[in-house]
Image (cartoon, coloured by chain):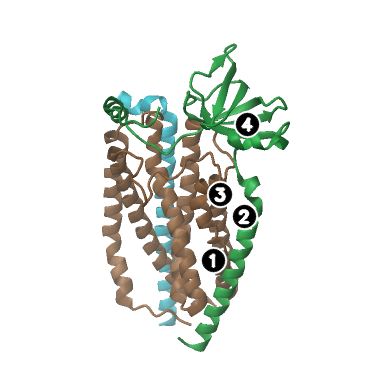
Chain colours: A brown, B cyan, C green
Amino acid sequence: MYIKIKNNHIELIKSANPYLIFATIFAFVIGLYYSLFQSPPDYIQGDSMRIMYIHVPSAWFALMTYSILAGSCVLWFITRNPLFNVVARSIAQVGMIFTLMSLITGSIWGKPTWGVWWVWDARLTSMLILFFLYIAYIFLWQAISNKELASKISAALAIIGFINIPIIKFSVDWWNTLHQPASISKLSAPSIDVSMLIPLFIMTAACFLFLVTVSLIRFRLVLIENKVLRTSN
Amino acid sequence: MNELLDMGGYAIFVWSSYGIFFFSLIIFFLINILNLRKYEKIFNKTKNKID
Amino acid sequence: MTNLVKSRLIKFLLSLIIVSIAVLIIIFNLRDNIIYFYGPTELLKNSDKQGQIIRLGGLVSVSSVQNESDSIFYFSITDGDNKIDVKYEGILPNLFAEDKGVVVEGVYMNDGRFIANKVLAKHDENYMPPEVIETLKKSGKWQGE
């Protein structure tokens, strides 16, 4: 089954690319100014809390990207429209990078705050499992040469792995963990001061722009990869 | 300026985490852009052959 | 919706239900192993934990920290209801303070004391600049320390 995407849609994505790159860089520059210069240090953690401004958006988008990945795998499984498969493969690697970044920056924050780089509590362990799920998804697809079969197996893995997402989200509420519970939730006022929320939200917007920019580049890459694979066979 | 570099004694932690974060994002972005160029070239070649 | 899509949807939902039930059973049974630390009240209820290497977490009781020498510390950990006395030999993390969260790893002795060999500072979810804390304290609205 061939993917039905109009050429002018691809052209539209292509022409948006430079603007998206510019917007991402712009948002990151503003975000850096706010998070390193403008925002005050925390009353206990001091300046080490500035790591939060990159750690928290990374973790948010690690979870969000996986939800989209699992969602498009479900849609692909049911409808077998190859477009959903392409979407899943476009965003998987960006999600993996964000997961890795939240693990690394969290670890660097943990050393001065907790006194250790790593602990095996529920939140950290489930986040590490998410990283392995991303890797497994990406490598399974590459390792199996029959691409129809590869899509089936990797999609099944992504869907089963989705059970990890609510576990990550609620691990800090369900079990005693060393990781603190969420500071920002819908049900209550955030326990972060406004002067610290502003840089956090700018950095979140910048990370979102990065996610969109790279995902669209990868979308074109995956489409063309599919075409090359098809013509070379 | 020194105050900014010092980060209240947390300089290594703050600067290394920001450094690793942006370095990885830029590298990841470049890998994908270069891969796209590479595949576009291969694709154009095969298309020319068919034509 | 074609019949093929419908049958795939039904198969998918069925397998989803089975997998979620399996995961719920696993999580429910792992409960005790996933808990990273116990509170003082939980630990006092479970006397079978005595003599084992476990982790204990809570707040450092106010004015309970005493140091015998530069590296031997005595303090107690509380959850508001119960207290457990802790002895620790080593270096304390920077953020260790009275009335702040802490997790200690070590042996829960038969006499009810805790000999720790590792102390981790536990941070709460509040992020505030120092000036805000000052004004909150002045106006008497600060709920913390």
Q: Is any atom of residue A143 visible in this view?
A: no
Which residue does the numbered mark 3 point to in the structure image? A128
Residue A116: give x, y in percent of width and height: 55, 33
Q: How much space separates mark 3 and mark 4, taking CA atoms?
A: 22 Å
In 3D space, how far apart are the residues under numbered discs 3 and 1 (Cα atoms)? 17 Å
In the depicted structure, whether residue A81 falls above or below residue A182: below
Measured in 3D between alpha carbons, the distance from the residue under mark 2 to the one under mark 4, in whole angstroms, is: 24 Å
For label 2, the crowd category at 10 Å Cα-Cα, with few meaning under 14, some 14 to 19 and many 20 or more, is some
For the point 50% across and 47% down, the residue is A173
Q: Position of residue A60 (x, y in %)?
A: 42, 52
- Circles 3 and 1, Cβ within 8 Å, touching? The answer is no
Q: Residue tagged by mark 1?
A: A159
For mark 4, what is the residue?
C105
Q: Position of residue C8 (x, y in %)?
A: 54, 80
Task: In the rendered structure, find residue C89 and report the number of the disc placed on it.
Answer: none
Whole-Å distance between the Cαs marked 2 and 3? Answer: 17 Å
Report the side of A178 relative to A37 (left or right). Answer: right
Amino acid type of disc 1? Ile
- Name above or below for residue C37 compared with residue B40: above
